[in-house]
Image: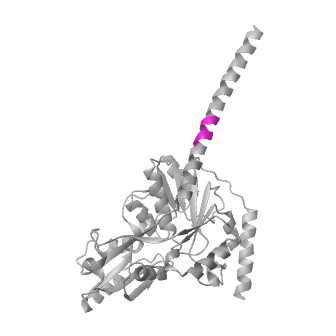
Amino acid sequence: MLTLLSKLYGSLTKFRRKLFKPYYKAQVPTICIGNLQVGGTGKTPIVLDLAKFLLEKGLRPFVVLRGYKGKAIGPVLVDKLDSEYFGDEALIYFRHGIDTIVSKNRLAGIDYALNLGAHLIILDDGFQDLRIDYDKKILCFRPFLSKRDYTPFPFGILREDLENSSLADYILITKYNLYKKDIIDKTLKILEKYNKNIFLVPIKLKNITNFSGEKINLESLKNKEIYLISGLGNNLSFKNFVEKELRLKVKKHIKFPDHHKYKIKDIEKLNNILKEDKRIAFLTTEKDFVKIFDLIKNKDLKLKENIFIVRTYLRIPNKIKEDILNYMKNLERIKKENLNLETVLEVENESYRNCRTYERR
């Protein structure tokens, strides 16, 4: 029954794509970085990498997102560390110096970014928003462990039929280095039916920091009892990364749902665990830490000394970055040529008007 419902749902999403056409085109290039799978596809670090790259090139990119589970309706510019108001993902971009707009209405968020001087807009999520005519669309996938990973709701975890991945300019299979080769080969084989422009993107360690933001040596954690704390779309990927890439043995993994809103009772529970064993080191993600930080920054807790943030990164392939830059250069050239053409036409029209005036004399 669920399989039949998934087929019906997938067919409806394909029909919806054919029925509705985008009608909103921003005045600057807009890039959508989205997914079909629900959570855990590495979308946030991909958005961050592209934004930082464009910033280094002298451009002013804005990230626009809805601020999932945040209270802000927007559009509003993120200007402080308040995960309860802005949501967790918005704070990650803000911490890295990226101009970030939270807006439940994406169109209003784009307009607000334009008014603030955006050269380019990156939409965190939004592939399913059919109102927007994107210049480039990037889809992030995690490898397919089971049929559920590439099947629509309700049997699977896809927001729409996998066939719609053909509409993306690029497809990224993220964190592929945490999976066996046969799983990656299977994922490629399935996706290549719909899109050939596929790239494999590994997840790598940037650094590990303590509560104060100071970098620590990985070796200092080797003799600790490792406890993981995470509230992600794919908690297993965090455990796999710590064990396979950092080569740390995980004793316990405290898991929460994606975008979990940490509460005081969660913090008290963690602090009580420390009282039982002082050798424990809590490892968490940057996405989780921005919310935990809000709760413990002004408290005198042992947890501050024993919590460490594992900062990772995903890099967009250089080919995609070059394509985006070239696309922007071509747009600029076209705009200049159009401006020159308009100027020529204005001059010609003025000359024509002058000639007609002379003739009448």
Q: Residue furthest left?
A: 300
Q: Residue at x 59, y 36 (%)?
A: 336
Q: Position of residue 240 (x, y in %)?
A: 45, 82
Tell me where the magenta segment starts and ends, as one range: 332-338
The type of colouring in the image is one colour
Q: Position of residue 174 (x, y in %)?
A: 53, 71
Q: In this figure, what is the number of numbered marks?
A: 0
Q: Residue at x 56, y 75 (%)?
A: 142
- Is residue 80 visible in the rendered image? The answer is yes
- Is residue 28 visible in the rendered image? The answer is no
Q: Is residue 238 left or right of residue 359?
A: left
Q: Residue at x 48, y 46 (%)?
A: 117
Q: To which quarter of the image does residue 226 belong?
A: bottom left
Nearest to the observer: residue 235 or residue 73: 235
Q: Is residue 137 left or right of residue 92?
A: right
Nearest to the observer: residue 185 or residue 52: 185
Residue 27, above or below 279: above
Q: Main secondary structure of the magenta part?
A: helix
Q: Is residue 21 left or right of residue 132?
A: right
Image quadrant holding the N terminus, namely: bottom right
Q: Position of residue 45 (x, y in %)?
A: 47, 66
Q: Residue at x 62, y 31 (%)?
A: 340
